[in-house]
Image (tube, rainbow, N blue to C red):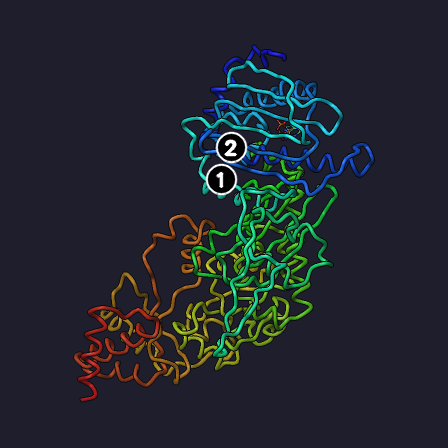
Amino acid sequence: MSKGNINVSVENIFPLIKKFLYSDHEIFLRELISNGTDATTKLKHLISIGEAKTELGDAKIEISINEEAKTLTIKDQGLGMTMDEVEKYINQIAFSGAEEFLDKYKDDKNETGVIGHFGLGFYSAFMVADKVEIFTKSFKDAPAAHWTCDGSPEYTLVENDKADRGTEIVLHIAEDSTEFLEEGKIRELLTKYNRFNQVPIKFGTKKVNDPTHEPQTTKDAEGKETTEPHRQIEVDDIINNTDPAWTKKPADLEKEDYDNFYRELYPMQFEESLFHIHLNVDYPFNLTGILFFPKLSQNLDMQKDKIQLYQNQVFVTDNVEGIVPDFLQMLKGVIDSPDIPLNVSRSYLQADGAVKKISGYITKKVADKLSSLFKKDRADFEQKWNDIKVIIEYGMLSEDKFFDKAKKFALYPTVADSYFTFDELIEKTKDSQTDKEGNHVILYASNKDAQHSYIQEATAKGYEVLILDSPIISHLMQKLEGGDAKVKFTRVDADFIDNLIKKDDAVISKLSDEEKDKLKPIIEAAVPKQTYTVQLEAMDSNSSPFLITVPEFMRRMKEMQASGGGGMMGMGNFPDMYNLVVNTNNPLVSEILSADEDKQKHLISQAFDLAKLSQNLLHGEELTNFIKRSYELIK
Ligand SMILES: Nc1ncnc2c1ncn2[C@@H]1O[C@H](COP(=O)(O)OP(=O)(O)OP(=O)(O)O)[C@@H](O)[C@H]1O
């Protein structure tokens, strides 16, 4: 028997371990299972190179709870340790590792930046146990060992008669951690961290139908058939899938396999994904994974499903900030990499060269996949556009490299359901939609119904009108305009149509300048001055007499501010401002001019309300009054 002090210089490490990372005590189980997994895969390797003369068998890791003894046991069939190895690995290496880890992070307790908390290793057991025992027998021909430590720096190490190869860690669960003696809690943790563990994990047994037994059907005297019940047998309850889809070669997988994996990953998700991207790189870093483009969903549960980060098939976190570019965080799926440093703060992570490369690689893979989908089946891509556009537009805004690639496949749908790429759009509209100053005006609407009359005016002239309705689209337009000084995006209700795209053939006004000077103050007096600027224009006589427009610049700045930054400071709080465009060629406007004062008021308020109605601006009392007045008119 040997007794000893682990390391006197850090006498208080155990209370520190207990207090440390309080909310993350649960990771002890992941750490111990990872050790068991390593021990098993190492043995497998030694057998394969002929260094270990033993059979691996169906080596698994077994987790068991003994409620009476208040213990939780993690037992593996890996390579085990000799007495000397326990002394070396547990008393020295593991301990100094834990010590170093704690030393580094003990002041960082509140820093959410520490992710994963890998590295504390074996000693994390003391977060939940007040005594830990190790029973271990090496695959080598050496006596088994029994190590005990009760949370003081003192340990004992004695020989033991354990006969089967492997290591058994017995945790005597502390009074304040008894939740880890509950089956439900352990099952939850196993599912969270280890459902794709490389080595099978057994947690209890379960009853299944005996596959060797065929239930017999018998007939009674009246010919009624009775089938005997299935015979049930008890089998190990293996909680994990050791071979998840992302560890396989894409060539070995069908679409169905990816769909099944999506469902396996998010069992509460009933929608299928739109498409997947299989990641697989081994230089200059190791990374595998599968990312899914989800269908846009209002379902909040769905938003909760996030990309999960694994390290060698062990779950680390579903907060992939800094590793996956922001714009791709709406994707779902898994990435697995042993090369991501996990016990560092996020700011460090973002500056890490390998992590930057990973993020760049993921961006490139996503762009390449989208590009190939676009080329392979454009109709299908167009159909999916609505679900994927926000991610792509966000990416174009935030990553220049992605912008350059996405410019070739990002789509601009029109109100007539055509989908153009940017280049196609420019080509299609450059002759008809270039104004007399040489500006190439791209017209768009944000809502087909709300801006219906404006859209109609524009399409009647043969112009293309896009439907652009993502929340960040104003930022993207700004960026696209920045790339070509002549291209201007303008919403269809930003002005009356002839002013949106000014051509040379100006319409002649039926009203003389004196008549206009007379008319303007009459209308101004009848509409709220602070909100509406009256603008007299000679338009087509068939166009509406009154038209409410929102200047493009003003509206876009407000929208950009509402969707986060970019707009001019303070614009978001600016009151709504509109132009009231009066068509001096419309007969009704001539009539207003020649009518008596009462009739003038009446005609203006009716026409003004109609203009408001077509901009969806007529509400409440104004709407009630308008309806009343309109009934009077048809009586
Ligand atoms: N179940 C086990 N079977 C065999 N050896 C083990 C087992 N658990 C721990 N060890 C030995 O103890 C050492 C220290 O374990 P510990 O978990 O503290 O650190 P680690 O696994 O090396 O690294 P990490 O800090 O990433 O967990 C291991 O490297 C291994 O040699």
From the image, state whether disc 2 or disc 1 is nearer to you.
2
Say which residue appears at 70% left-offset and 38% top-offset: 41
Q: Is residue 545 left or right of residue 391?
A: left
- Characterize the local packing of mark 1: few (<14), some (14-19) or many (20 or more) Cα atoms within 10 angstroms: many
Query: Mark 2, residues whose alpha carbon is within 10 Å: few (<14), some, or many (≥20)?
Result: many
From the viewer's perspective, is residue 372 above or below residue 585? above
Which residue shows up at 71% across the image and 41% down it? Answer: 57
Distance from the alpha carbon under mark 2 to that under mark 1 = 10 Å
For label 1, the SS is helix
Question: Image quarter for residue 287?
Answer: top right
2 or 1: tag closer to the N-terminus? 2
Spot occupied by residue 217 in the image (x, y as percentages of width and height)? 55, 70
Q: Amino acid at mark 2?
A: Leu
- Residue placed under numbered mark 2 in the picture: 72
- Closest to the observer, 93 or 572: 93
Residue 215, horizontal then vertical, whole percent: 57, 65
**Figure quadrant of the N terminus:** top right
Report whether the residue tagged 1 is closer than 8 Å to ligand 1: no
Closer-to-camera residue (384/313): 313
Q: Badge 1 is on which residue?
A: 186
> Residue 39: which quarter of the image?
top right
